[in-house]
Amino acid sequence: MLKGKKILIGVTGSIAAYKIPILIRLLIKEGAEVKVILTDAAKDFVTPLTLSTLSGNPVQSEFFEKTDGTWNSHVDLGNWADLYLLAPVSANTMGKLANGMADNLLSATYLAAKCPVFFAPAMDVDMYNHPSTSKNINQLKTFGNILVEPEEGELASGLYGAGRMQEPEKIIKILDSFFQKKKDFDKVKVLISAGPTYEAIDPVRFIGNFSTGQMGYALANEFSKRGAIVELVSGPVNLKIDSENVNITNVTSAAEMYNACLSAFSQVNIAIMSAAVADYTPERQQKQKIKKQAGSLTIKLQKTKDILKELGNNKRKDQYLVGFALETENEFENAKAKLKNKKLDLIVLNSLQDKGAGFGYSTNKITLLDNKGDIDQFELKSKSEVAKDIADKISSTYKMKN
Ligand code: CTP
């Protein structure tokens, strides 16, 4: 599975850098292409010559080559890689990455990289257990970066505990299973709704909500990365999709979203309705701008059609339907009721009582409830990690159904 994969390794100053030549040999043996970035501190532990010889590519550590002034573009390196592995990553570099600092080629490439990032810390046990290190690790995890957890063992200091970077053989296994997992929705057709809807009152005003569409777009990215063909029906948002195989239909109102979703539904295998659809729309849309008048203004609203419910009513046995429930009270009861009433296979519960969850945040905290009665609760994570958890759950339950 690593054959042909482009792996960029970022090495920082840690004694565990001695494991990197072995890791590169194993990656090359698996058929991967490898490039390496070294920080200055890393050069005290492993030489550029060793790494360039083993990887078959020049090792880079400066923004400019001092000899001929060639630019080592961090953007190009980030775009080149299918995966960026930071190993070993020191406490110091994690602190920089967690805070958006880009003072060397390794950290600038981290900010520019669009590919998945894995990080394998290595340090002494007390440094590893320091609250500041834990905070930085958690911060990187909320960005969607994947921790290669260090193991316990003898450390270079002579102490014993957590902080030893994983062995190269173990890292190879982790990377391999990551790439294998990625194609578990190969050619599966997935309909996703995302973002808010705007219900026009007159030519210049509307009723909307605070949804930014981040969750739905993260789902579209995740499914497309894993091989799915995604039909994304999106309300008005300021987001872009950077994956292949995503066809976007832009809509504004709940009625337009209803039409787009209903017409796509019969051709898909899985539908995930993550949009925050308006439940009510003005009974009449004024042709001219409403003028200010003395006294109050009443706008009569009528119910919109429930898209998810309609999909549930039209669902074939082989189709898998997922809804979201955004609740502020009696979360479980309300989510279970929606799961049943809308004939869903799975519902994703967000509670607004959880800090960092809901509209506008880049993080989310979800509970998954399926129609077999299984309940999975997750921690607060970045929306891209949440999308992975949802896709993992669908991957196992959709396959059981079909
Ligand atoms: N939904 C939909 N069409 C609507 C309203 C909601 O498809 N007109 C979908 C949402 O995309 C979401 C789910 O229904 O997947 C639940 O939305 P939510 O607003 O939590 O629930 P409602 O059914 O609207 O009920 P309530 O507002 O009373 O909680």
Image (cartoon, rainbow, N blue to C red):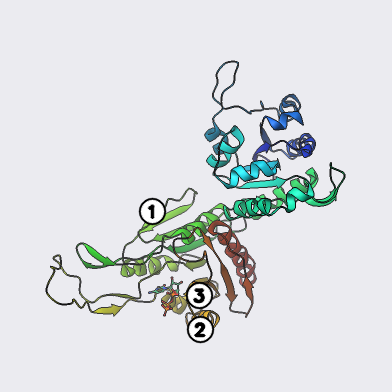
CA separation, marks 2 and 1? 32 Å
Q: Which residue is mark 3?
A: 316
Q: Is residue 83 left or right of residue 240?
A: right
Q: Is residue 91 left or right of residue 239?
A: right
Which residue corresponds to the image point at 56% horizontal and 69% vertical from the top-left? 366
Whether the residue carrying mark 1 lies under 8 Å from ligand 1 is answered with no
Percent x, y of residue 302: 28, 79
Which residue corresponds to the image point at 12% horizontal and 72% vertical from the top-left? 293
Image quadrant assignment for residue 193: bottom left
Quarter of the figure with the C terminus:
bottom right
Q: Relative to 1, say whether 324 is above or below.
A: below
Q: Is residue 382 left or right of residue 203?
A: right
Q: Which residue is mark 2?
A: 337
Give, as a three-letter code, the residue at label 2: Ala
Residues under numbered marks 3 and 1 in contact, where contact means CB atoms less than 8 Å apart: no
Q: Is residue 46 visible?
A: no
- What's the mark number on residue 294? none
Image quadrant assignment for residue 303: bottom left
Question: In the image shown, does 219 or 151 lie closer to the viewer?
Answer: 151
Query: What secondary structure is marked by label 1?
Result: loop
